[in-house]
Image (cartoon, rainbow, N blue to C red):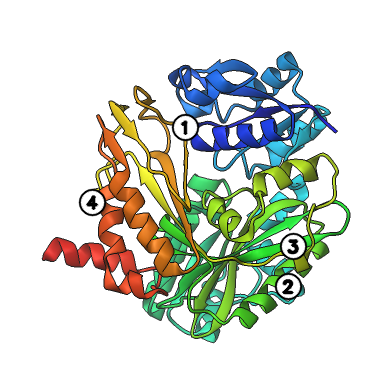
Amino acid sequence: MFNKVLIANRGEIALRVQRACRELGLQTVAVYSEADANARYVRLADEALCIGPAAPGRSYLNHAAILFAAHVSGAEAIHPGYGFLSESADFADAIERAGLTFIGPTSDSIRTMGDKVAAKRAMRAAGVPCVPGPDSGLPDDPLAIMAIAEEIGFPVIVKAAGGGGGRGMRVVRAAGQLLEAVNVTREEARRAFGKPELYVEKFLEHPRHVEIQVLCDTHGNALWLGSRDCSLQRRHQKVLEEAPAPGIDAELIRRVGERCVEACRQIGYRGAGTFEFLYEDGRFCFIEMNTRLQVEHPVTEMTSGIDIVREQIRIAQGHALSVSQRDIRASGHALECRINAEDPFSFLPCPGTVGVWEVPGGNGVRVDSHVSSGSVVPPYYDSLIAKVITHGATRDEALTRMRVALSELRVEGIRTNVSLHRSVLDDGGFRAGGVDIHHLERWLAEREQA
């Protein structure tokens, strides 16, 4: 049990976690960089401590500063939010060694699932369907590398075992390109992730990105909370998400969800997590597991009725899950638009001071944001400033509510990507549902040429 939680993050997720803590009667400690001194979540916390200058490496990624803040404030648990240190096994270890509670999975689970080769091996053992390809790293021998790729069949994709965020991967369409791609990707992986290990698997040409959300306690209970479709992406970065994934057979999703839950039991997983799949031609293929809270968790909360952040905290306190699988019923449809401080079509960040901030409301509308009029959007961090979420009895109703919500959203002083979202909602392919992960980039290219 614990009564005071330090939130090792910033922005909208810091406020989201803070609210869940307050609902549970827990005190909160906000840590902030000098650039975030006047942030709303800092003002609303029970205590707030500056942990360093604006640079993330000297503040939000500084293990020692965060642990010292926990010690000084008397916090007994740390919630990492998403991004920053949320998937750092070393940080989770350090928290446990300090006698504190990490609100997340064990460091062993983070390490296993953070290594894409180890994760694939664990998922295959649990019967989770995976992308075709061996669950072992690539050897050094060029002939052996070539033999593996030819057995899979071109095109293949070479990936860094410790990669993420769209980095450390190369598509190879012919044998003559393979060895150069391996050499370049290996060096990129060594520089970016500190480990050169690679693996190779089949490259799927037109997949969708579909996720399964899970929650697991320490009493042997595990749930899956339905599906999400996160296919609307640019350069592997998500722009808009929805739940459930449209047009996929519910029975197929149920079978995959049950395999995910079984995998969690086999690896002793605890807390919230997300299984990410590529879906093509009626088949699910596992690609990775995110051992943390996802940016897009609200669409699952809206359709399942489960407060995922609240359950995360309760699990860390040692409580059993408050619901069982038979209680989970997907209700209606939800959409989430990520509102970023950036040019809507060049995607260049646009930091600055928000002059006017008016958010939408009404039935089925939710806005998760730390921003208000006068807020400063600093240039040092991710450009996400809000998430607009709508829920309806049907996908069409959720889409209609999103159009109305975005028409009401008024932001002045900085540029945002709201006009991009408005345009996407009117795109015929997206309205029909089930677009693949390349749809947005194709749409942007066609718009530029028009």
Amino acid on which disc 1 is placed? His
Q: Nearer the viewer, residue 398 or 13?
A: 398
Q: Relative to 347, does residue 26 appear above or below in the rendering? A: above
Q: Mark 3 — residue?
A: 223
Nearer the N terminus, badge 3 or badge 1?
Answer: 3
* Element carrying mark 4: loop
The numbered mark at residue 258 is 2
Q: Residue at x 57, y 31 (%)?
A: 61
Front: mark 4 or 3: 3
Front: mark 4 or 1: 1
Amino acid on which disc 3 is placed? Leu
The numbered mark at residue 345 is 4
**Residue 239 % position (x, y):** 39, 55
Residue contact between numbered discs 4 and 3, judged by CB atoms under 8 Å: no
- Say which quarter of the image contains residue 148: bottom right
Amino acid on which disc 4 is placed? Phe
* Element carrying mark 1: loop
